[in-house]
Amino acid sequence: MDITNAPLPIRENEPMDRHTSWRAGGVARYYAEPGDRAAALALAAWARAHSLALIWIGRGTNLLVRDAGYPGLIAMYRAQQWWIDEHSDTATLTVEAGAPMAGVARRLAAMGWAGLEWAEGLPGTVGGAVVGNAGCYGGDTAGVLLSADVLVDDVVETWPVERLAYAYRTSALKAARVAPGALPPLVLSASFRLTRDDPAALMAAMQRIAAERKRKTPAGSSCGSVFKNPPGDSAGRLIERAGLKGRAVGEAIISPIHANYIVNTGAATAADILALIDLARSEVLRQFGIALELEVCVV
């Protein structure tokens, strides 16, 4: 395909281990990084005109690309502007989807705005948080989101939080099935509800969260939690009870610190990681009758 007429720079045969927190996986046939809404709309139109399959990603913190690679276009949305509309002791934050969730949360806390402090240390972007209903330490996206601007085919729609149909670590966007020939939706920006609070108290709370996260998080390249927690239980606890802590395939290992983490210790392949995912699933199902559901996306 001739990519010289593309509306923004496109790289061919891009190694996706450069763009995922697992630091593993195959290549994307085409790869682009639109930096604003106009560029994203133009790229989507170009992909549609060339019948090119497209996947939108954030920072690759919840993503594994199989070693065979992806034959279409992978695009990382990079827009990061944000602004606040204040109303006395409340405010509306509007933030573009490529902004880092944790970085925005820290800046808001320093300004005395509460609502996202639970996101301290949360990997990934605002867009990824909106799609996956990211949450931790007593908060989640669904609890503070007001609405999101979503690119659906070539139309920008504003979805109120109710339309996203949030549930534990999922949403209508994450669960959507894209029709053949259609493009997947892209979160362009999101609006959140904030309340005024004491900056010192907010920063202290975030420091406690940071310390707790550091204590629980294994060192090395990982995507965080691999599986969703089943109702009333913990995926990490089940995998540990199954005797799989420390089990390795190639250079991937089920962390001895937290069994719901699979860590790339050097040059693990996607196949190594997938082998451990399959092992954890099969053993937990065999021993406890519980089917673990992936939290990460495998392409």
Image (cartoon, grey):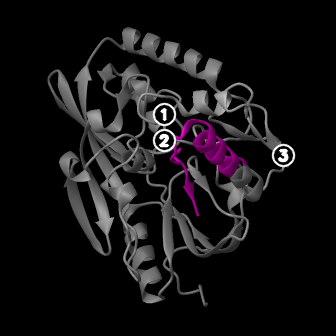
Q: Position of residue 92 (x, y in %)?
A: 22, 36
- Near mark 3 (Cα within 10 A), the count class, few <14, some 14-19 or many ≥20, is some
Q: Which mark is residue 247?
A: none
Q: Residues within 10 Å of mark 2 (few under 14, many from 20)?
A: many
Query: Residue beneath label 2, please?
Result: 100
Q: Amino acid at mark 3?
A: Glu
Q: Quick one: SS at disc 3?
A: loop
User: Which residue is denoted by mark 1 in the rendering?
Assistant: 103
Label 2 vs label 3: CA separation?
Answer: 29 Å
- Label 1 to label 3, Cα distance in Å? 31 Å
Q: Is residue 8 above or below residue 19?
A: below
- Do residues under tags 2 and 1 come within 8 Å of each other at their CB atoms? yes
The residue stretch that appears in magenta: 276-299
Write down the quadrant of residue 18 in the picture: bottom right
Q: Please, which residue is most extreme toward the left here? A: 87
Amino acid type, mark 2: Pro
Answer whether residue 259 is visible to the viewer in this image. Answer: no
Residue 162 % position (x, y): 19, 47
Q: Residue at x 36, y 47 (%)?
A: 130
